Structure formats: C-alpha cells, structure tokens
Image (tube, rainbow, N blue to C red):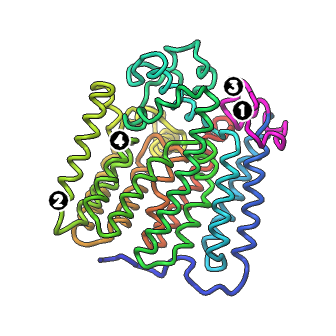
C-alpha cells in the first residue's frame, strides 16, 4: 500500500541500555500515587463524592487516600502527577526496545487492575449510564426523552452527573445497561468498572494482534495504548464506555486486517450502535476494500439498518438523535477545545468577545475537518493505508470538536499505534499533553 510505512517505526532500534525499563518503573510509581491518593472522603478528584463518600464508591484503595485530596492543592498536585506520567510515558515509547514482551504485558495488566480498583476519577459519566438504565428498567421512562431529573428519589440521583441531560449514547449501549438496574447502584458501578478495564485490555490485545498481522513488533503499539495516562486515569478508573466502543471498533479493524473485509466493516459499523463517533473508521475500511467494495458496502448498510431498527423498536425516533456523528454534545463547549481557544484568542486581539466569533470559528473548523476527511478518504481509495488515514481523520475531528474531553483519546490511540507514522504518534502525544488540564479541578484554568 502507498505510504504504509513512511518512516522507521518508533522505538525500533536495538536496545543499548535499560532507560526504558527505569522509565517504566518510575511511571508505575506515579500511577500508584494517582490511583490511590484521591480515594478519600469528599475528594475533589472523585466528583461523585458530591453525593456522599460511601465505602463502595471510594473502593478498596481508600485506606491509602489522603485528606489533601479534598483541599485546594488536590487538583494542582494531580495535574503535576499527570504531567510526570505523560513525560515518562513518552520516554517509554522512545525506549520501547528496552522493554521485553513479558514485562510489557504484565505491567499493562497490573496497571489496569490498579485503576480498576481506584475510585471513579474526574467524571460522573458512569453514574449517568446507570441513571439512564434505571430510568428505563425501573421507572419505565425513555432515557432519550427523560433526564435523571425525572427520578430525584432514585438512589442513583445524588451521584449522577449532567442531571438535566437526556442520553447521547447509542441504543445498543443503552439496552445493554438495562440489566444493571437490578444490581443496585454499587453493583452496577463495579460491574461497569470491570467491563471498562476488561474492554481496555481487549483493545490492547487487539492492537497487539493487529501489529502482528501487519508484520510489526507488537510491544510498542501495546505500550502506546496500554500505558497512556488518559486511558488509565479517565477511561479505566472513570469507567467510560469508550473502552467498549473502541473494543468493537478494533475487533472490526483486526478482522479487516485478517482478510475478512465484510466482517470487519460490519463489526466497525456495529460499534456506532454503542456510540456514533465509532462510525468514523467505517468509510476507510470500505474505501480500502477494493475490488470487493460493493459487498463491503452492502454489509455496512445492512448493519446500519439493523442499528436504526433497534433504535426505533427500543426507543422510537428520539434514539436516532444519538446516532448522529455530531450529536448534542457539540452544543456544549470545553474550554480546552481548539474552537474555544481560537475564539477566545480572537476575542482578545480583535474587537468584541469570544462569543462574537464562536459560531464562525466552529464553522471554519468543521469545514477544515470535512476537507481532511475527503482528502484522507480519497487517498485511501487510491491505495494509502486505511488505518493511517483513519488515524489522521480521527485526530482532525478531535481538533475540530467543540466538546473535547480526555477520555476521547482512546478513539485515536490504537489507530496511531498501528499506523507506523511517527508524525501521527507524536501528534497524538502532543494532543494528550494539550488535554491534560481538562476535567482536573483547577478552577477556570481546567474546565
């Protein structure tokens, strides 16, 4: 394929020292602190403590929690720890040749277990999943038309985030969560935590397998995904559904790489039933499937129709809103999104305020993304590596999005890890650095 390996893979030189192993050990020490110290009553880093600090919420690591987590220095110290983790992570990637397969596997598994046991850091989204499940299963209310405000007496209500928001998640994910309603809040929470950790490990395993299918050494791609600070702190500890979504997406990618393009495209399309953002990879798999593009396109359309039918039967037409790639989240704004910062800069140097430029800036970013999407898709059709092109398009949509949160980086990590493009790898690391303040309690600086 054209441009499949434009540069020497990162970390591919022979090991001539133990710098990578030392950096990995130091990274593990930092991660232990990030996972354990916030597990304290009223912790500012465990947002769900707004509803109380029961033992089941803080988890088994609460014996190591520090009271400083509920003070003004909790956020800044955690932020500093994330920077230390990201720098050490970058060193490990540079020196991946120093790390053996066995060390890589056991370290990734051990860190996933660590953050599985950690409290839900920096987000209440997992309790929103449970709230939507209980809305439907326990109260007979449609989560696409009702918010948690409709059940103020439910046990989940004190812990749920975005209490006034209806569900933006795919109908397949929503239906999968319904059985959790019978487990109680604590049981549902820890089930979702376990699912997130296992799904994340599944993404790492599929990345490993994808590298093998591409004829590349799998350790570096696995380390890039499995050691990422945002993955462990936000996706695993926070139990975000990105892990499950990307697991299905990567199952499709690996199936495609294994020479089964119809099954791969269908699986990747099915991931959009969990969350619409997963659908971005699908066009690249279709475009790369020549001369079997017709059969692959039929499989994709059939899977899309099945998802739409599931949405209609399960929830009616309102659920279809959640299947839009740019759903209602784009009505929200992250202070560290690129459109926000651009509008803020224009408001500082030109007449008017940020709000005077917001809509125009968002439109410009949307047009720019459309251009990147069209260009990368055309290159895929002409023979470029679909994983690499999908990786650049995923990076582009994250830059163009008005709602940028750190757990979204998992969409990009396995694609960048498999693309054999050093520029994409370091662009991904740079994006991770940009997103470090998001969701950290740092006042207006962090949100």
Q: Earlier in the sequence, mark 2 or mark 3?
A: 3
| CB atoms of marks 4 and 3 within 8 Å | no
In the image, residue 69 lies in the stretch drawn in magenta: yes
Work out whether 139 lies above or below 129.
Answer: above
Q: What segment is highlighted magenta in the picture?
A: 41-70
Could you say where residue 425 lies in the image, as x and y percent from the top left?
50, 67
Whether residue 356 is visible, yes or no, is no
Work out whether 285 lies above or below 333.
Answer: below
Task: Look at the magenta stretch and give its main secondary structure.
Answer: helix
Query: Which residue in the protein does label 2 denote?
Result: 295
Which image quarter is the N terminus in? Answer: bottom left
Q: Earlier in the sequence, mark 1 or mark 3?
A: 3
Q: CA distance from mark 1 to mark 2?
A: 49 Å
Give left or right: position of 316 versus 42.
left
Count neighbours of disc 2 (C-alpha within 10 A) and say few if under 14, some if 14 to 19, many if 20 or more: some
- At x 46%, y 68%, the residue is 209
Q: Nearer the viewer, mark 4 or mark 3?
A: 4
Work out whether 270 lies above or below 286.
Answer: above
Count neighbours of disc 3 (C-alpha within 10 A) and say few if under 14, some if 14 to 19, many if 20 or more: some
Which labelled disc corresponds to residue 50?
A: 3
Query: Which residue in the protein does label 1 denote?
Result: 56
Which image quarter is the C terminus in? Answer: top right
| CB atoms of marks 2 and 3 within 8 Å | no
Q: CA distance from mark 4 to mark 3?
A: 31 Å
Could you say where residue 317 lies in the image, as x and y percent from the top left?
27, 26
Work out whether 214 lies above or below 317.
Answer: below
Query: Which residue in the protein does label 4 denote?
Result: 273
- At x 75%, y 67%, the residue is 25
Could you say where residue 3 lies in the image, as x and y percent from the top left?
34, 76
Q: Nearer the viewer, mark 4 or mark 1?
A: 1
Could you say where residue 365 lies in the image, as x and y percent from the top left?
37, 47
Q: CA distance from mark 4 to mark 1?
A: 31 Å
């Amino acid at each position: 394929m054209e441009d499949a390996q434009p540069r020497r893979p990162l970390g591919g030189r022979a090991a001539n020292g133990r710098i990578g192993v030392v950096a990995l050990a130091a990274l593990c020490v930092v991660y232990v602190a990030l996972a354990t110290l916030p597990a304290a009553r009223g912790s500012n880093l465990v947002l769900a403590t707004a509803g109380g600090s029961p033992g089941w919420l803080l988890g088994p690591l609460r014996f190591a929690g520090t009271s400083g987590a509920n003070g003004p220095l909790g956020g800044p110290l955690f932020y500093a720890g994330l920077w230390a983790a990201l720098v050490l992570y970058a060193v490990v990637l540079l020196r991946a040749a120093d790390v053996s397969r066995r060390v890589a596997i056991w370290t990734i598994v051990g860190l996933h277990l660590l953050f599985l046991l950690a409290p839900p850091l920096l987000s209440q989204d997992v309790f929103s999943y449970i709230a939507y499940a209980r809305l439907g299963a326990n109260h007979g209310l449609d989560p696409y038309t009702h918010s948690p405000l409709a059940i103020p007496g439910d046990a989940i209500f004190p812990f749920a985030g975005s209490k006034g928001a209806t569900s933006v998640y795919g109908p397949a994910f929503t239906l999968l969560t319904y059985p959790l309603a019978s487990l109680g809040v604590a049981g549902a929470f820890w089930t979702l935590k376990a699912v997130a950790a296992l799904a994340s490990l599944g993404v790492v395993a599929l990345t490993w397998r994808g590298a093998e299918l591409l004829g590349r050494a799998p350790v570096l791609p696995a380390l890039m995904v499995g050691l990422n600070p945002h993955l462990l702190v936000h996706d695993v500890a926070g139990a975000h559904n990105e892990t499950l979504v990307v697991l299905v997406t990567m199952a499709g990618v690996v199936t495609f790489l294994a020479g089964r393009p119809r099954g791969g495209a269908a699986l990747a399309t099915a991931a959009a039933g969990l969350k619409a953002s997963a659908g971005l990879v699908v066009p690249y798999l279709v475009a790369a499937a020549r001369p079997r593009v017709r059969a692959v396109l039929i499989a994709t359309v059939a899977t899309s129709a099945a998802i739409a039918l599931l949405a209609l039967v399960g929830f009616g037409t309102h659920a279809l809103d959640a299947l839009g790639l740019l759903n209602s989240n784009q009505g929200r704004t992250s202070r560290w999104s690129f459109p926000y910062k651009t509008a803020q800069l224009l408001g500082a140097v030109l007449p008017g305020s940020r709000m005077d430029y917001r809509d125009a800036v968002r439109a410009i970013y949307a047009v720019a993304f459309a251009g990147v999407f069209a260009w990368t898709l055309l290159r895929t059709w002409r023979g470029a590596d679909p994983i690499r092109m999908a990786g650049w398009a995923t990076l582009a949509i994250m830059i163009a999005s008005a709602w940028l949160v750190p757990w979204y980086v998992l969409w990009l990590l396995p694609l960048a890890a498999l693309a054999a493009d050093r520029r994409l790898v370091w662009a991904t690391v740079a994006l991770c650095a940009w997103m470090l303040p998001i969701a950290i309690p740092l006042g207006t600086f962090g949100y």
